[in-house]
């Protein structure tokens, strides 16, 4: 099946997606890599309010190449290896009703278990950063820019971002375990 999902996500929307489905994302998403995940989890454990929200969100494992003239513009936004976020993801998933993750290479069995009933993993093709950038309509903001361009959290408005493949669904199905 082919779907266009919109943010904020709903549990029903996440649960209808199955391994192998083709997905495009429209709305808002944010990028987060290792350092952003580590800081976010630390803030959550300290009961600090995050400047972005994982709940009902689409999180893109990406360190974009961004330039600024009058405003920020994403030049390239290819996915990074999602397995690097394995230590953080189950604890983040405990705190959300639903979410989607976009990345490459899959995630651990522990993450697959934590995703059940609430999250999907969407695989985006590595090396296709220029294609990804075409779907990014606007940079809405940047958070934690002290981490540097690739590790900062970029808040992005996207239209038909993809194509992504549901590689792990909210029912425990995984292309990586087949």
Image (cartoon, rainbow, N blue to C red):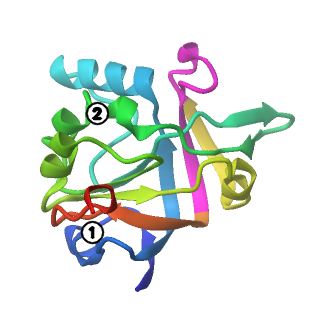
Q: Give the quarter of the figure containing the N terminus.
A: bottom left
The range drawn in magenta is 143-158
**Residue under numbered circle 1:** 14
- In the image, taking residue 118 as reference, residue 4 lies left or right, namely right
Asked if residue 77 is positioned above or below residue 88 in the image, the reply reads below
Query: Toward which corner of the image does residue 155 lie, by quadrant?
Result: top right
Can you give x and y, in whole percent of width and height, for residue 169 in the image? Answer: 26, 64
What residue is shown at x 21% (from left), y 72% (from top)? Answer: 15
What residue is shown at x 33% (from left), y 30% (from top)? Answer: 50
In this view, the residue farthest toward the top is: 146
Is disc 2 surrounded by few (<14), some (14 to 19) or many (20+) residues within 10 Å? some
Which residue occupies the foreground of this view, 143 or 105? 105
Comes first in the chain, label 1 or label 2 = 1
User: What is the number of callouts on the image?
Assistant: 2
Secondary structure at badge 2 equals: loop
What residue is shown at x 54% (from left), y 26% (from top)? Answer: 152
Can you give x and y, in whole percent of width and height, for residue 85 in the image? Answer: 35, 32
Secondary structure at badge 1 equals: helix
Can you give x and y, in whole percent of width and height, for residue 10 in the image? Answer: 26, 68
Q: Give the quarter of the figure containing the C terminus.
A: bottom left
- In the image, taking residue 39 as reference, residue 126 lies left or right, namely right
The disc placed on residue 86 is 2
In this view, the residue farthest toward the bottom is: 1
Which residue occupies the foreground of this view, 98 or 3? 3
Q: CA distance from mark 1 to mark 2?
A: 20 Å
């Amino acid at each position: 099946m082919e779907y266009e999902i919109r943010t904020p996500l709903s549990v029903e929307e996440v649960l209808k997606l199955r391994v192998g489905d083709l997905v495009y994302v429209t709305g808002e998403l944010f990028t987060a890599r290792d350092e952003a995940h580590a800081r976010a989890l630390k803030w959550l454990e300290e009961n600090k309010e995050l400047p972005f929200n994982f709940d009902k969100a689409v999180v893109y494992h990406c360190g974009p190449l961004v330039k600024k003239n009058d405003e920020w513009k994403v030049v390239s936004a290819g996915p990074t290896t999602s397995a690097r976020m394995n230590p953080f993801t189950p604890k983040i998933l405990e705190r959300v009703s639903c979410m989607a993750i976009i990345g490459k290479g899959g995630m651990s069995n522990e993450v697959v278990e934590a995703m059940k009933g609430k999250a999907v993993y969407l695989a985006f093709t590595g090396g296709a950063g220029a294609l990804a950038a075409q779907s990014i309509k606007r940079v809405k903001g940047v958070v934690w820019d002290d981490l540097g361009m690739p590790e900062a959290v970029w808040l992005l408005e996207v239209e038909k971002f993809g194509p992504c493949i549901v590689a792990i669904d909210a029912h425990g199905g995984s292309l990586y375990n087949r």
